[in-house]
Image: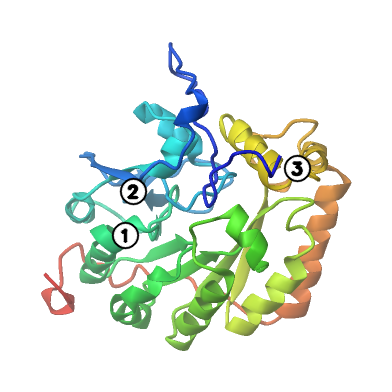
Amino acid sequence: MQDEKFIKGQGAQRNVINRFDRYTYEPDDEDFETVKTSFTEVFPKTIVNQVKSEDLPMEYSMNPYQGCEHGCSYCFARPTHEYWGYSAGIDFERKIMVKKNAPELLEKFFQKRGYKPAPILLSGNTDCYQPAERQFEITRKLLQVCLDYRHPVNILTKNALVLRDLDILKPMAEQNLVSVSFSIPTINEDLRRKMEPRTSSAPNKLKAVEILTENQIPVHVMVAPIIPGLNSDEPLSILKAISDAGALSFGYTLVRLNDTVEPVFVNWIEIYFPDRAQKVLNLIRSMRGGKLGDKRYFERQRGEGNIAEMIHNTFKIGKKKFFDGKEFPKLSTANFTGTKDQQLRLFD
């Protein structure tokens, strides 16, 4: 219930059990408190991942951070934290792993003999512009490498911090090397504070879309996820707002709660929306064949049942009404040479 003890401004309220742990620890009530964020440097051998999912459009992705401070309870990436020995709950938001060697690894990837360039998604898992980026600037350095090598990159973020890097993004856009996808699941600011407590505000996201557009940087918006009973009444309002701000296209997904995302989300909604928690969970089940999650390729994107179909139809109407005639450009690989252009370096 809302009047129970809970951590304000945090998605996960507890650490859920790691599926791979042999032993578990159940905290006492006095352990219930806001946990300070910690950063741990890790040393991966590669930074670019080949995306093999059949229903995802990108070929490559890279993630400068593991874990995400934004605190979205529904985040599909939460279970990945368990492979590091952490929990998909509070740990995912507060124990952030930092890949400082990512820019050097990206250069090595570009220099591979026989590499054929294809746009890379930054990030495909956790947000490359989460608050940690203000301190570490790894995303900025990765973008500089992409500019140096004239390599295309698609940015996906919930954070207006992307505007900090306009000095790099603008020359990239001049060569058709960059696009930005903003995640905007709601423009209801009260709901946004609960759904994604440490992201940029909805007005700031829309302003960022406008500024990027003014600087000739193409913007796509992910209206995701749609959670029936929470933000499922907003698609037309969101589509109008992002179209007016200059977005050229949009996408959307229906919420799915796979693996340890489920207990995090269930606990979150029971705390923040006790009056409709069971209704929302039942609506999700109606789209997922009686379950809260779905891992089937293609089906996981579309869902099933009347609720899912109504959402799809709403977006079809919105596309025709607000995006008719708009077209999102395809990024170019034509200028990639596999060697660094020192003249394009903006900092060292």
* Count of residue discs: 3
Q: Counting residues from the N terminus, which is met first, the one under dot 2 or under dot 1?
A: 2
- The CA span between labels 1 and 3 is 34 Å
Q: Counting residues from the N terminus, which is met first, the one under dot 3 or under dot 2?
A: 2
- The CA span between labels 2 and 1 is 9 Å
Q: Secondary structure at mark 2?
A: strand
The type of residue carrying mark 1 is Glu
Q: Which residue is mark 2?
A: 65
Color theme of the render:
rainbow
Residue in front for this viewpoint, 56 or 102: 102
Q: Residue at x 71, y 34 (%)?
A: 292
The answer to whether 128 is drawn above or below residue 234 in the figure is: above
Q: Which residue is mark 1?
A: 133
Nearer mark to the viewer, of 3 and 2: 3
Image quarter of residue 95: top left
Using the rendered image of the protein, determine whether residue 257 is visible from the camera's viewpoint. no
- The CA span between labels 3 and 2 is 33 Å
Q: Give neighbour class at mark 1: few <14, some 14-19, many 20+ (Cα, 10 Å).
A: some
